[in-house]
Amino acid sequence: MIKRNNDDIKADRPTLDEVKFIPRIPMYFLLENIRSAYNVGSIFRTADGMGAKKIFLSGYTCKPSQKDLSKTALGAELAIPWEHNDNPVLLANQIKKQGIQLVLLEHTKKSKSIYDLDWQFPLCVVLGNEAIKMLAEGVASASDIDYAMNLGYRHPMGPLELSDLVGLDVRRDILIGLAEATGDNSYLPHPLLEKLVNSGELGKKTNKGIYNWENGIKSERNDLI
């Protein structure tokens, strides 16, 4: 059996004009602060393959026609409708006003199985990252989590380091806004994030956050959990 290559797959794709007449299912995706262009591209490809209606991009999530996104999207970014807004809370509210149910996809100890959910369409699957929860639960150190994302997902910067650079207070406020907009308490900031913000440890701008940033140089903290 000979495996089909990307050129073969692309050759069988409907043209962009043909795509307009193909019915799409009432399913959407909201990507909240996903840095890896490769991951975003693969989500575009998956969403297009399943016939999803639209993708919403927010925060620093990369957008078409970013080169690395196109490498994994394989043309899907040209076929499936998408929209970008820097504010994920605003997007979530807009989606809810359209009568679309928001479902947060996360892998935590309190997550419900996808097989136990009462799926009601139209629905929007919200994707983000849960790195600080992994840190708080002792899954790995901050540097190990960031390194895994660098190595395994080709992120140029790990999610925890990036949170420190953006500001932990900014990250917390976004999560609170998303929890209020979606009505899903799963989005509420992890107690560790609240603790750091309330202590004034906001990341690089205060010389301490998830990492120590003395003199602007990043180093591991051993007193977080």
Image (cartoon, rainbow, N blue to C red):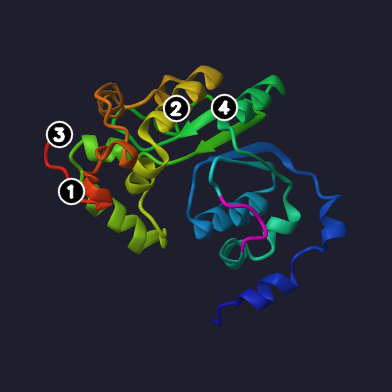
Secondary structure beneath label 4:
helix
Identify residue type, mark 1.
Glu
Along the horizontal axis of the image, is 194 left or right of 26?
left
Residue 19 rendering spot, x and y as whole percentages: 81, 55
How much space separates mark 1 and mark 2, taking CA atoms?
Answer: 25 Å
How much space separates mark 4 and mark 3, taking CA atoms?
Answer: 29 Å
Identify the mark nearer the N-term, 1 or 2. 2
In the image, is residue 199 above or below residue 76? above
Identify residue type, mark 4.
Val
Q: Mark 3 points at which residue?
A: 225
Q: Quadrant of residue 221?
A: top left
Along the horizontal axis of the image, is 67 left or right of 187?
right
Identify the mark nearer the N-term, 4 or 3. 4
Q: Quadrant of residue 133?
A: top left
Q: Residue 175 carries which label?
A: 2
Q: Mark 4 points at which residue?
A: 89
Identify residue type, mark 2.
Leu
Q: Is residue 80 magenta?
A: no
How much space separates mark 1 and mark 4, taking CA atoms?
Answer: 31 Å
Principal SS element in the magenta part? Answer: loop
Identify residue type, mark 3.
Ile
Task: State the residue at coordinates (45%, 33%).
Answer: 115
Q: Mark 1 points at which residue?
A: 220
Quadrant of the drawing holding the C terminus: top left
Identify the mark nearer the N-term, 3 or 1. 1
Q: Residues within 10 Å of mark 1 (few under 14, many from 20)?
A: few
Q: In which quarter of the image is residue 134?
A: top left
**Disc number lying in front (3 or 1):** 1
Secondary structure beneath label 3:
loop
**Magenta stretch in the rendered image:** 62-66
**Disc number lying in front (1 or 4):** 1
